[in-house]
Image (cartoon, rainbow, N blue to C red):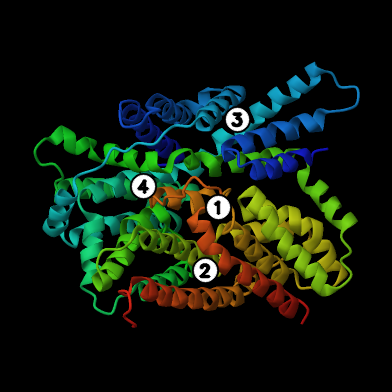
Amino acid sequence: MIGLPHAYAIGGVFFAASAWFSARDRSNPHRLRAGAFWALLALSFLAGDRLGDLGNGVLVVGLVVLAALGTGRSSQGTSTAEERQAGAVRHGDRLFIVALVIPATALAGTVLAKQTKWGAKLIDPAQATLVSLVLGVLVAIVVAQLWLRPDARSRAAALGAPLREGRRLLDAVGWAAILPQMLASLGVVFLASGVGTQVGRLFSEHLALDSRFAAVAAYCVGMAFFTMLMGNAFAAFPVMTAAVGLPVVVHHFGGSAAVVSAIGMLSGFCGTLMTPMAANFNVVPANLLELPDRDAPFNAVIRTQVPTALPLLAANILLMWWLAFR
Amino acid sequence: MSLLGIAVLVLGFILRANPLLIVLAAALVTGMAAAWSPGADAGTLAHAAVTTLASFGRAFNANRYVSVVWLVLAAIGMLEHLGLQERARTWIASVRAATVGRLLAVYFVLRQLTAALGLTSLGGQAQMVRPLIAPMAEGAAEARSGPLPDRVRFMIRAHCAAADNIALFFGEDIFIAIASILLIKGFLEQSGIIVQPLELSRWAIPTALAALAIHGVRLALLERRLRRMLSPRGERM
C-alpha cells in the first residue's frame, strides 16, 4: 500500500536535489544558505522520524535562522524564449493534456482509494488525496518523458529535467514553502498552553455585547482579525467560537449554531485574504508570479484581495444577523 | 500570561520581521510564559524553552504532509521548460472574445463550482495560475493592445492570483466533506451540539453568492480600468 511514508521519501529526494542545484547555483549570492535550507528540509523528510523531538526542534531552529539571514534569489533561467516558443508549437495541446494528468490522477486515486477494495489496497485511504497527488506528479513526469521527449539530445539531462526545473520554481517560492507547516505546529503549542480559553476570557470581560448585532459583528470581525494573526481560519475558529460565537451569539441571543458557525468560518476566510501569514495563498503566488513587491508584507496579491474581502466581511455580518435568528 | 505569544505575533507583524522567525518566537515565548512565576529562575525558563522546542519539533515532524504538495513544482517546472506558458498564451489569443475580465470571470465561476463539488485540487497557484491562467490573461490583453507596460502586467497577474483564492475559499465550504466543515462539525459536537454537514454547507451558499457578486463587480471594474490604461493616448474606446 502506498502511503505517507512513500510520499515523504519522494519529497525528501526532491528537496535534496533542490539543495544540490541551489548550492551550485552561482547566480545566487547566498547559494550556500539556500542549499543548506533545502538540505535541512530534505533531512526532515527523509529521517524526521529518527531525529527525536528535540532533534526536530533544533532542525526547525536551523531552518528559521537560515531564512531570517536570507537565502538569496536565483536568477538562473530555464530554456530560452525561442526554445519555449518552438516547444509550444511542436507539442501544441499535448502540453495541456499532460498538465491535466496531475489533477485527473489526484481525483481518480482519491475516488478509487475511498470507494473500491483494491483501490484501498493500493493507496492508503486515510491519506488518499495527498498520495494520489504525488502519484499524479509522477505519472505526469513519466508521460511527458515518453510522449514529449524533452531534451532528446541526452537521456541523463532529460531525467534530471523535472528536478532541475522544479528546483527553479521551489527557489522562487523560497522560505514561504514551510510557513504553513510552521503555523500548524504553532497551533499545537497554543492548544497545549490554553491560549484559546485566555483569548475567550479577554473578549467576554472587555466587550459589551449587549445587542444581537454587536455580538454578531464582534464574532465575525474577531474571526477575521484572529485569522490574520494566525494565518489560518482553522486555528482562529475554535478560539473565537468558544469565546464569543457559542456563549454569546448562540446561547445568549438564541442564534442557530449551524448558521453562526458556517458564516463565522467564512468570515475567517475574509481574514485569510488579507494577511501575509497565509503564505501559501498570498506570498507564494507573489513569488511564483515574480511580482516586484513580493517581499513587502502587504504585496500586490493581498492589496488586490482587500477590496473584495472587506465588503464580503460586511456581507457576512449582515447575513449572519438576518439568517441566524429567524 | 500565555497571551504573550499572541503579543509576539502582533509585534512581529508590526516590525515586519520574517514570519518564520515570528512563529518560532511566539511558540517559545508561549511555552516560557506558561512556566513563569514570580520566583522562577533562569534554569526553569531555559528548561521550559527546551521542552517547548521539543514539542514544536514533534508537531513540525507530524505536519510534514502540509509541505508534500511542493512536489507538484517538478512536473509544472518541466512543462514550463517545454513551452506550456507560451502555448497557453497563443491559445487564448486565438479566442477572439477573450478579455482579461471575461477570462477571470469564467475561471472564477468554474473554480467556485468545482470547489463546491469537492474538486479543490483542480486549481491552485502553482498548478493553474502560474502555468496557465496568468499567461492566458496576459496573452488576452496583449492580443488586443500589443506589448504590456510592466505596471499593467503585474496588476493582471495579481488579479489572477486573487481570483483563484477568492473562488476557492467561497466555493469549497459548499462541499460537505471539506476540512473546514468537518472541523466545525467536530467542534460543535464537543460542545454538545449535533449538526449534519449538509446543514452547515447549505449556509455557505449565501456568502458564496455574495462573493460572486462582489468579485464580479471588481472584475468588471478591472476590465474598464485596463481599457483606459491600454488605450492609445487621445483615443477613446
Q: Residue at x 33, y 78 (%)?
A: B234
**Which numbered dot is residue B72?**
4
Q: Nearer the viewer, residue B62 or A40?
A: A40
**What residue does disc 1 label?**
A298
Q: CA distance from mark 4 to mark 2?
A: 23 Å
Mark toward the start of the polypeptide (4 vs 3): 3
Mark toward the start of the polypeptide (4 vs 2): 4
Give the amino acid type for the residue marked by disc 2 in the picture.
Gly
Q: CA distance from mark 1 to mark 2?
A: 25 Å
Q: Nearer the viewer, residue B153 or B135?
A: B153
Give the amino acid type for the residue marked by disc 4 in the picture.
Val
Q: CA distance from mark 3 to mark 2?
A: 34 Å
**What residue does disc 3 label?**
B57
The answer to whether residue A17 is left or right of residue A222 is left
Q: Residue at x 33, y 50 (%)?
A: A136
- Label 1 vs label 2, nearer the camera: 1
Q: CA distance from mark 4 to mark 3?
A: 25 Å
The answer to whether residue A261 is left or right of residue A198 is left
User: Percent x, y for residue A29?
Assistant: 37, 28
Label 4 neighbourhood size at 10 Å, few (<14), some (14-19), many (20+)?
many
- Label 1 vs label 3, nearer the camera: 1
Mark toward the start of the polypeptide (3 vs 2): 3
Mark 4 falls within which chain?
A: B
Mark 2 falls within which chain?
A: B
**Which numbered dot is residue B91?**
none
Residue sitting farthest toward the front: B234
